[in-house]
Image (spheres, rainbow, N blue to C red):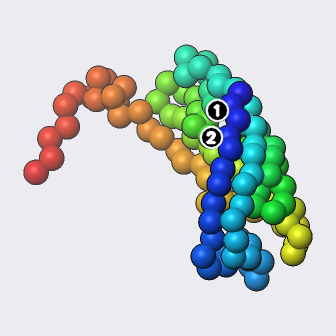
Amino acid sequence: MFGRINFERLDTPLPVSGDVSVPVGDYDFKSVTFNYSLGRQRRVSSFFSFQIGEFYDGDIMSVGYRRGRISLTDRFSLEPSVSFNDVKLPASDFMTTPGGPACRLRIHAADVRRKAGPVRLG
């Protein structure tokens, strides 16, 4: 768990979602983040985060799942990540998914090389 105190001066409006912008001005805002990590030695590992606090002249609540790894076999794993931000500003309330949900399939080449021998390129 950690807390954060932010100060930001906006000289121009900051677009945050669609047609919603944070107006020019000085902003002090605070937040608290809670993190939990499952170790890489587990079949399912990841990093969870939960943030709650102020966001410019409004409030934010964020939930994230990052650095995830789900081992399907010894050679294949899925690595999902996703985050959601629930933002409440005087001008509008909105939800965002920065970068959108993502998942990639990883082939563990070190295991393949050990079984098949070295691979030469070129």
Q: Quadrant of residue 107?
A: top left
The N terminus: image quadrant: top right
* Image vertical order of residue 1 relative to residue 49, above or below: above
Camera-nearest residue between 80 and 61: 61
Q: Residue at x 60, y 76 (%)?
A: 11
Under mark 1, the amino acid is Phe
From this viewpoint, is residue 21 visible?
A: yes
Q: Position of residue 81 (x, y in %)?
A: 64, 45
Instruction: Between residue 67 and residue 34, name the one nearer to us.
Output: 34
Residue 86 visible in the displayed image: no
Q: Are marks 1 and 2 in contact (CB under 8 Å)?
A: yes
Q: Which residue is mark 1?
A: 47
Residue located farthest toward the left when viewing the structure as drawn: 122
Find residue 64 and report its image quarter.
Answer: top right
Q: Looking at the picture, which amino acid does disc 2 mark?
A: Arg
Task: Give the labeled residue for mark 2.
Answer: 66
SS at badge 1: strand
Residue 43 lies left or right of residue 48; in this view the side is left
Tell me the number on the disc at residue 108.
Answer: none
Q: CA distance from mark 1 to mark 2?
A: 5 Å
